[in-house]
Image: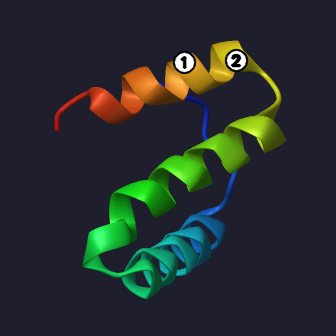
Amino acid sequence: MIPKVMTNAQLEAAYDVISEGIDAAGAEKQTLFLAKLAFALANLVGDSGQVAEAVEASLRDL
């Protein structure tokens, strides 16, 4: 499990922004948008180990 560092309100705000980005990208470019977003967020995190941990956590229970 990854540590929770944001409040529920912050997570909800992030969810809203990401959802709006997915919608704005359109159906044909959603995958490209999500890949670019993932790279941008990985760069902000700055730790490949944490990125790997997030990938593993995200794959659980799909």
Q: Is residue 5 visible?
A: no
Q: Please tell me the numbered disc located at residue 52.
A: 1
Give the x, y percent position of residue 53.
53, 19
Q: Please tell me the numbered disc located at residue 48.
A: 2
Q: Tell which residue pokes out farthest to the top in this image.
A: 49
Residues at discs 2 and 1 in contact (Cβ within 8 Å): yes
- 39 vs 4, nearest the viewer: 39
Q: Tell which residue pokes out farthest to the front in this image.
A: 28
Q: Is residue 23 left or right of residue 28?
A: right
Color style of the picture: rainbow
Element type where label 2 sits in the image: helix
Q: Amino acid at mark 2?
A: Ser
Corner quadrant of residue 42: top right
Kindly identify the residue that appears in the image at 54 percent across and 18 percent down: 52
Q: Is residue 61 above or below residue 18?
A: above
Element type where label 1 sits in the image: helix
Give the x, y percent position of residue 7.
65, 61
Kindly identify the residue that appears in the image at 38 percent across and 84 percent down: 23
